[in-house]
Image (spheres, rainbow, N blue to C red):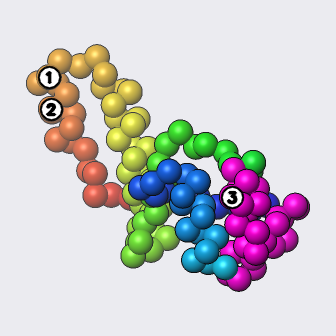
Amino acid sequence: CLFFAAEFDMFVGGYLEVLCTSLGEQADEIFGRCVGYPGTGAPAAFVSWMLDHRVPAGFSLHGNPGATADEVHSSLELRERIIAFAVETRGLEPAALRERWARQDWERRG
């Protein structure tokens, strides 16, 4: 299986045409093992094939350039702790919520 994701600031057809012409042989190396892939030698077929295999995500995916795997895992752990905190404290009055927030050790891991 191959997962290819991209965000771009133009119409999808135009983006795929640029992808086809700018990647050329690299695109053929990447997608060449996929069933029915027409290659970049036929740009219209390339665009059509890519559109036929498109799965709209409905949301954006952003990488973590420069982050180590450990930093990503730590961030995900913190995210889960914050979500759990929000669920546990959703009915508290503002003063109690502030007090509970202040007691948290958000720097600890796990």
> Residue 11's x, y, as percent?
50, 51
Residue type at tag 1:
Pro
Find out whether the residues at labels 2 and 1 contact each other: C-beta distance under 8 Å.
yes
> Residue 73's x, y, as percent?
47, 61
Secondary structure of the residue carrying tag 1 is helix
Q: Which residues are magenta?
A: 25-51
Q: Nearer the viewer, mark 1 or mark 3?
A: 3
- Which residue in the protein does label 2 denote? 98
In depth, the one of 31 and 57 nearer the eye is: 31
In depth, the one of 81 and 103 nearer the eye is: 81
Secondary structure of the residue carrying tag 3 is helix
Residue type at tag 3:
Val
Distance Cα–Cα, label 3 vs label 2: 54 Å
* Residue 23 visible in the picture: yes
- Which residue in the protein does label 3 denote? 47
Q: Residue at coordinates 26% horizontally, 50% vertically from top-left?
A: 105
Left or right position of 2 against 70: right
Q: Quadrant of the C terminus?
A: bottom left
Q: Which numbered disc flags the more N-terminal residue, 1 or 3?
A: 3
Left or right position of 4 against 2: left
Q: Residue at coordinates 53% horizontally, 39% vertically from top-left?
A: 58
- Does the segment drawn in magenta span residue 88? no
Q: Nearer the viewer, mark 3 or mark 2?
A: 3
Residue type at tag 2:
Arg
> Residue 82's x, y, as percent?
35, 41
- Which residue in the protein does label 1 denote? 94
Q: Residue at coordinates 69% horizontally, 50% vertically from top-left?
A: 51
